[in-house]
Amino acid sequence: MVQAYILVQTEVGKAAAVASEIAAIPGVTSAEDVTGPYDVIVRAEADDVDKLGQLVVAQVQGVNGITRTLTCPVVKLG
Amino acid sequence: MVQAYILVQTEVGKAAAVASEIAAIPGVTSAEDVTGPYDVIVRAEADDVDKLGQLVVAQVQGVNGITRTLTCPVVKLG
Amino acid sequence: MVQAYILVQTEVGKAAAVASEIAAIPGVTSAEDVTGPYDVIVRAEADDVDKLGQLVVAQVQGVNGITRTLTCPVVKLG
Amino acid sequence: MVQAYILVQTEVGKAAAVASEIAAIPGVTSAEDVTGPYDVIVRAEADDVDKLGQLVVAQVQGVNGITRTLTCPVVKLG
Amino acid sequence: MVQAYILVQTEVGKAAAVASEIAAIPGVTSAEDVTGPYDVIVRAEADDVDKLGQLVVAQVQGVNGITRTLTCPVVKLG
Amino acid sequence: MVQAYILVQTEVGKAAAVASEIAAIPGVTSAEDVTGPYDVIVRAEADDVDKLGQLVVAQVQGVNGITRTLTCPVVKLG
Amino acid sequence: MVQAYILVQTEVGKAAAVASEIAAIPGVTSAEDVTGPYDVIVRAEADDVDKLGQLVVAQVQGVNGITRTLTCPVVKLG
Amino acid sequence: MVQAYILVQTEVGKAAAVASEIAAIPGVTSAEDVTGPYDVIVRAEADDVDKLGQLVVAQVQGVNGITRTLTCPVVKLG
């Protein structure tokens, strides 16, 4: 299982709608609005890194109002 | 009360119009055109960080010609 | 109460040690190693935005091996 | 007279000391700690753009704990 | 002969189509989807740096769905 | 007199046309296509920093195909 | 098996030495000097995303002269 | 012959000394201090892209006080 944070930038004025729509996608465990260079921070999980990529491109990026996503897979270094 | 700087990027050619329109929003105390990676630097204040986020998304980002905003809340570290 | 994500960059080779040390700071609810432009993503909470700023500067940034932190306060836009 | 915002990044843990030291420099009208990609936002003024550059390099960048400054001159587009 | 990596950002949801279309351009030796700040990483070669620039602007950037490309010529420093 | 470099990003496929159109603007002394994070690097001069800002916003940004400009005024520090 | 590009920034003057040292690390399939915002582009592979993270932090980042690495895992979206 | 702009970041307080030292390097045709995200903008030329890379790494980056350089080769797209 791979977990990841997805840092999302949205079109102006769309952050709240984007966060609530992303939160409903299967595999997404949280989606919150933030201030700063990103507008929404998402946490998601998938079976492997390919499935994670497909989740981001096919599901998350399909939400209207997203301009960029930056996927940061969690790694266990210990 | 929370104060913040909002660093604004605009569509090309729109900086002057954006600054004067933002300056008229209640809660905004200044809005000036600058050169560099940002086009307009705004100073605003709100009751708390949620109200500040709502001011940015609902009011500032509603101004035509804005492409990105970066909110930097002022913090008192002393 | 203010919640925030803190995106952390570390010196090369220090990510794992930094994450486990940050995880032990009171007010921090998670700290995970990630790949990409950031090395560790932290979730923290504080009474208000000033307290959050103090937590970051006085506690998180005191961890050896951190080079930059980027604090993204969670905002409720609804 | 040229006015400018100076966006300052500091070494970890140094933001508060840097802001109060910059605030005492002649030509600086304000210096506040912020969260986000920058640590301190300064407002300053000088006779012209060369004097502004000299103020930044010789005075502001002389403050211990600064790692980068980004000068954004205010421009009157109207 | 000049070789280069081209780091490509795409519109949301377009990464897979962009990569397979770029892969078919003469002079391109590979084009793979990645996660992170870039969406596709391309390797290409051309006779000289002007031809490389023309390949990027006339061929690669002609692919529908690309928003930015960043060309990094390989250099032999030894 | 203020001199400046203007780092320009263009829409994909538009770099050559943008450079030649900018080169014809009064006050612009050179405009060349480059590879890397910017697409065109321009050198321009104006009477003062306000006039420079107006040149950029009213003339340079009026060229079709530009997405961002970053103005870097030359400063004499000696 | 996970494959990745690793975009490396080095201390000034260290790019050639860093590339040749990284090229000798098991799991690394190529390491080339480039111009632009990155100094060396590496291709590597590992059993899974955790092993990839460990390769980067324990092996690649152990090379003297590296200041930042940005890992971009290859994803199969098809 | 390859021409290039080199965008240089320096340690705080070092911009003027860096610019005058770079200006004396053979192959460098100009080196000027600027404000903004870069501190010095250099123009240089070399026989080919490999020689340009060597000039940057062996000569320009050897100047004391430089922290990053970003080489942007000029390309003729016409």
Image (spheres, coloured by chain):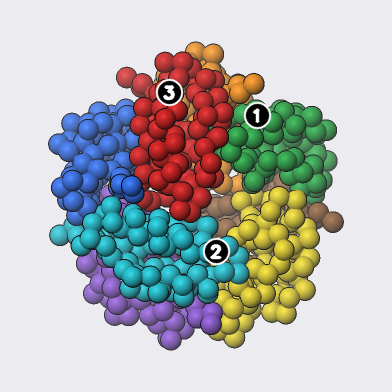
Chain colours: A red, B cyan, C blue, D purple, E green, F yellow, G orange, H brown
D49 or A17: which is nearer to us?
A: A17
What residue is pinned by disc 1?
Answer: E16
Inspect the image, locate mark 1, and give the three-letter code of the amino acid beneath it.
Ala
Quadrant containing the C terminus of chain B in the rendered view? bottom left
Tell me the SS state at disc 2.
loop
Please name which of the two marks, 1 or 2, marks the residue nearer to the observer.
2
G70 or B11: which is nearer to us?
A: B11
What residue is pinned by disc 3?
Answer: A27
What residue is pinned by disc 2?
Answer: B65
Q: Which of the 4 quarters of the picture holds residue A61?
A: top right
Label 3, label 2: how far apart the Cα atoms are: 35 Å
In this image, D46 relative to B14: left or right?
left
Inspect the image, locate mark 3, and give the three-letter code of the amino acid beneath it.
Gly
Q: Badge 3 sits on which subunit?
A: A
A20 or A74: which is nearer to us?
A: A20
Q: Is residue C44 visible?
A: yes
Instruction: Residue F44: give its label.
Output: none
